[in-house]
Every structure is written in structure tokens, then in C-alpha cells.
Amino acid sequence: MKALCYNSVKDLRVENVPDPEIISPKDMIVRVTLSSVCGSDLHIINGFIPTVKAGDVLGHEFMGEVVETGRDVKKFVKGDRVVVASVIACGECHYCNEQSYSLCDNSNPNAYMPEKLYGDTMAGIFGYTHAFGGYAGSHAQYIRVPFADNGAFKVPDGLPDDSVIFCSDAFPTGYMAADMANIKPGSVVAVWGAGGVGQMAMQSAWLMGAERVIAIDREPYRLGVAKEKSKAETLNFTELEILEALKDLTGGRGPDCCIDAVGMEASGSGIGYAYDKAKQWARIENDRPLVLRDAIMACRKGGTISIVGVYSGFADKIPMGAAMNKALTFRMGQMHGPKYIPALLDHVQNGDVDPSFLVTHKMGLDQGQQGYDMFTKKEDNCMRVVFDPQMRM
Amino acid sequence: MATIKITSSEFIDRIVIKPLPTGSSYINVGSTERIVSASAGLALMYLGLRKFSMPGLLLGAAGAALFERGASGYCPVNNLVQKNSAKRPVNSSEITKSLTINKPRAEVYQYWRKLENLPNFMQHIESVSQTDERRSHWVAPVPGGVGRISWDAEIVEEIENEKLSWRSVPNAAVDNSGEVLFKDAPGNQGTEIYVIIKYLPPAGAIGTTIAKVFNPAFKQMVKEDLRRFKRLMETGEIPVSEAQPSGKQLTFNDTTHDKIEKEYESPML
């Protein structure tokens, strides 16, 4: 089969790789119909998340059609249309029992790697480096889905692929960001990052009863989408002093809930940005925590910071004094997919949210490099490039 | 039935049953003598086997015996004449490890107690067979596929669903002993298991040095085995990802790959 593989930093290639096979009885094989690029892939492709190897198949946000099931797969039969959580979880360990699926004890075969890095292991993720399990990704014609009964969900009839694909990752991540942000009726929610996850966080904030939603980005077209599709007020941080603007917009208090949907490769300006960029270039610091710093400074006293933008290692100059003395609450994590996906499919079916506006470009796998370049450089008003691996090449 | 009460902190200081120095860890040749023996043996083997001839083979065989004496630290002649040129302190290496398994204590214990199950998660053990109520026979392949080693072990103490301790019987390939404790985890999180393994390095003083080098690897091995045990108990399988499609298989001959990978790999790991 064809698959889009990592070759080296900023170098992707389409390769002929062997078809996946059922290895464990709980596996199933899915014929991928859509597979999306994701901002977190860029951290891998740009060389900031270690343990990726040449030849690794990328991609973790996908849907498709079941073509083969292992003997212990109970929920699915051949031909079912499914959307699959990007995070792989066993469904049996203590963390899975608590629905903290991204903390699964068992799904990462390379547990010793994150153990060294993070002090414990976390769940495996499709196509997301060997430290996160070394599973082959979804930018391929077929994919093996381990623990299929736990991670895959049947797509209700009649829902188009474009509306469903983001229930794999972007929607549950954004939804979890809002869920963690402690949103109550009357809350003012600020969301840094108006990409796929940010947009989903904004729309989820409305579902949870937010009073106002403010989007922060530097790309005018993304802020335009935030305004039009996610009904957010917008702030462009290249045009104004963001901390001041947030105070001015909120009666001098600051937002109640601050969501970081950007993560380790934040862009910005000024001395802080230059400092982080230089350290990251020299590999002294993995993460550029510009958004996190701003969120801490902007958040109202006693407010909540919710982090779903990915950080991988060490971040410097975090204003802990502000965080502590303002009594902020921090919540964060990779998304617990299976906890949210059934409810999100309901929201899509009811028409509460239709994430299909994120699909701005559709391509075949052979245009993989081009797709990622376009996504990275935010060309042609790109929100998300979605690959159709079955497209004739 | 007697029950033992043990807390996690006590576990660290707990004195376990010690392995008896009998098998390969028993040495009676001193260090200098061993180095001389081993080197002389190697030289003789080289000289003897360089040409294929009867005297050559004999020389080679003598060399092999001498090398074996040096490498193992055990000399049958020394043993016969009751001579022991080794002045050795017997220091056993110890590995401790604990893990929580999200299954009831009885279930976890019963799986472990059926010793035939152990190779299902102990990666380096080929088979275990129970020979009588207390004794078992263990077989492990030698790394590199050059043969097998085997030894017998006996259960020294057994408290159902709580504790199992064992010791290798005299003349084991690796003198070892150990203890596994099973304890309810707080907050209904299943079972905590505590494993303590003591073993005598296979060759006295030189062996101690070797053990220092290999102990971390051995510790990691025990850790990975326990993790496999947990995964098997909780999910019924041991998740794998390596046997999956990768472009590497086809582009491996592209020599730039390894270089790029090394340059790229973050120094954090």
C-alpha cells in the first residue's frame, strides 16, 4: 500500500509499504477514507519531538471503513464506517476505567521511553513517534487499529465524512479544553490559537454555556473563520498589546478561562520570542511557551488555564509568581478521545456543531509534502489539509 | 492461615532469603590466577586450532580447559585437593521492583503461582516446569542463540494470595533467590506486587564488576517483564507496534537515513 512517511526533518516521502495485518485478537484493519494533518504533526516534522525514525508512517486523525476484524472485536463487522480516536487506549487499566484514556498504562509498547522523559508512560498515539508507541499512522491506505472496541466508533448513517473526521482528534481535543476550563454560565473564555483545535474549543465553549468567547491569533483569515464559524470576538496579537486588550475587553478583570490551543511552537514578537526561538534552535529549550506566559498574565484572579497545545520537554520563564499569587487553576493533557467521541458524534448529528468547515483542502497522499508545506505556511487560507488515501495516484 | 502484614516502606528494608553460593558463583581460583589461566588458555587454543592436526586439537582442548578455568573461576583440580586460591567476599546483587495491576489479588497470585505461565511474560525464560510440589525446572536460552542454561528452583515459603519466595537449588547456573509479595492497592486499584530478586554474580570478584555493568540491564529486564505481566493480566495481550508497516523496510539502504536520524535525535533521551 501507499503511505506518507517521515524521512527526515521537513522531508516527507510517499513510500510503498507492506499492508498492515491483524497482530492481536483485539485489532482491526481499517481502510482509511480521510486522514487529516494536525498542528502536532508539525512538531514532529520540524524536529522538536524526538524518537521519530525515517520510514515512520505519520498521521493520527482519521476515519474509514472496517475491512478485517480480530476474533475478539465485538463492536464491529466488515463494512462498518468508523471514526477512530487518535489516542490508543486498552480500556482495561485503572486510568481507562477512570476515562483518562490518554494516560493508558498498557497501550504504549515503548513505555520505557516516556518513562525516562516524563517519569511514567502514557498512551500510544497513531503515527506519533516511538516514544508514543511507534504505531504506524493513518496517512496510508490501510491502518491497524489496536483495541478497536475501545478506540473506534461507528459513524451514524447519513453524516458526511467531512463532518465526522475531526471527531477523531481536533473536536475531542477542543472539547476537552473547554471541559477542563471550568466554564460556567457567564464565563468569558479566551482561546489562543484559531486553528482546528482552537475553533473546536470555541464552539465547545458555547455548548458549555460561555457568555463570551475571544479568539487570539495572528492570521487574519483564521480570525475571520473564528468570527464567522465560531462566533468569537477576535484579537490579532500582531496588531495590539494582547494583555492590555484582554483587560480592556473584560472590564479590567481578564478572561475567566484561558485555553492554550497552540503549544510548544508558538509564534510571537519581541524579546521573549527571540529568547525562546534562540534556545529552541540550540536545543536548550524544547518548548516556546509564549502563549502559556500570556495566558497566565492575562487570566483573571482565581481563573483557570486549560492547556491542550502540545508541549514536549522543558519550558523556561514561566511566571509562577503570577500563577501562584493569582491562585490560578491549571488543567492540561492529551485528549481522552473515547470519553468524548460518542457525545460529539451526537452533537454533529444534531447539527450543534459541524466541523466540516475545517476541511479547506483535500489531496491525495502523493501530495503529502505539498499539503504539509501549505498547512505550515498557512497558504491559501488553509485551515486543514485532509488526505484521501484512496485518491488515484 | 497465617497472614503477613507488610507496608510498602517495610518492603524496601525487608531482608530476603539469600541465595546459596554453589553453582557457577562458587569459585576457588584467585583473580590473578584466573586472568593468567584464561589468557594462557586462549593462546593455547589459538596455537592448537590454527592447524587441523591431532596434536593441535589436543593443544586446543587443553587451552579450552584452561580458559574455562579462568573464565569460570572454578578449578576441579583445586576442588579435589581442597585448594582455594580465591579470597572472595560473597556479595549478592539485588533487584527490587513494584507495580500495580488492575485485577483482584487472588487472580494475580494464581496466575503467577502456576509457574508454567511465567514464560508468557518473562521474555528471557523459555520454559518453567513444576517437577514436584515445591521444585521447578527453569530453562533459558543463552543470548546469541548458542545454547540453553537450566536450573532447578524450590519454593521456600508460600502464603496463598500473599507471598511466594523461592531459592535456586545447589549447583544452579546462576544462584538466585527471590520473593514476590501481593498486596491490595488502595482505592480499589487492584493489586500491588513487590518483587525482590537476589542473585550471585557468576564469577566472584570479576563477576561483581560484570554484575555492576549488567545489573542496570537486568533491572530493566525485570521491570519490562513485570510490565508485560501487568499488560497480560489487564488486557489479555501484550501490545506491540514494531511488526507494523514502515517505509524504513524499503528505504533502509539509503545510507543518509541513519546519519539524519542521529543528527536529528534530541539529546533528551
Image (spheres, grey):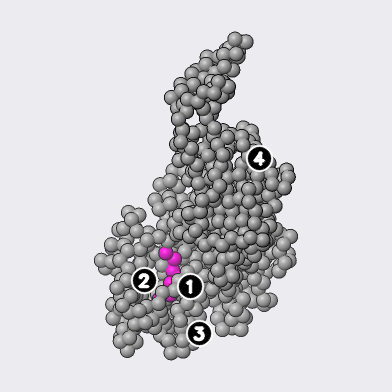
Q: What residue do we see at 64% from left, 71% from top?
A: A153
Q: Quadrant of residue A281?
A: bottom left
- Judging depth in this view, the residue of A140 and B140 nearest the camera is B140
Q: Crowding near pointer 3: few (<14 within 10 Å), some, many (20+)?
A: some
Q: Nearer the viewer, mark 1 or mark 3?
A: 3
Q: Secondary structure at mark 1?
A: helix
In the rendered structure, find residue A208 and report the number of the disc placed on it. 3
Label 1 environment density (alpha carbons within 10 Å; few <14, some 14–19, many ≥20): many
Q: For marks 1 and 4, give the one nearer the viewer.
A: 4
The secondary structure type at the circle numbered 3 is loop
Above/below status of A341 relative to A139: below
> The disc labelled 4 sits on which kind of residue?
Asp
From where the camera sits, is residue B234 visible? Answer: no
Question: Residue at 56% of width from left, 71% of height from top?
Answer: B187
Q: Secondary structure at mark 4?
A: strand
Residue B244 falls left or right of residue A382? right
The crowding category of the residue bearing disc 2, from other C-alpha atoms within 10 Å (few below 14, some 14 to 19, many at least 20), is many
A297 drawn magenta:
no
Answer with mark 2 or mark 1, whichever residue precedes in sequence: 1
Q: CA distance from mark 2 to mark 3?
A: 23 Å
Label of residue A292 in the image:
2
| Measured Cα–Cα span from mark 2 to mark 1 | 16 Å
For label 1, the residue is A197
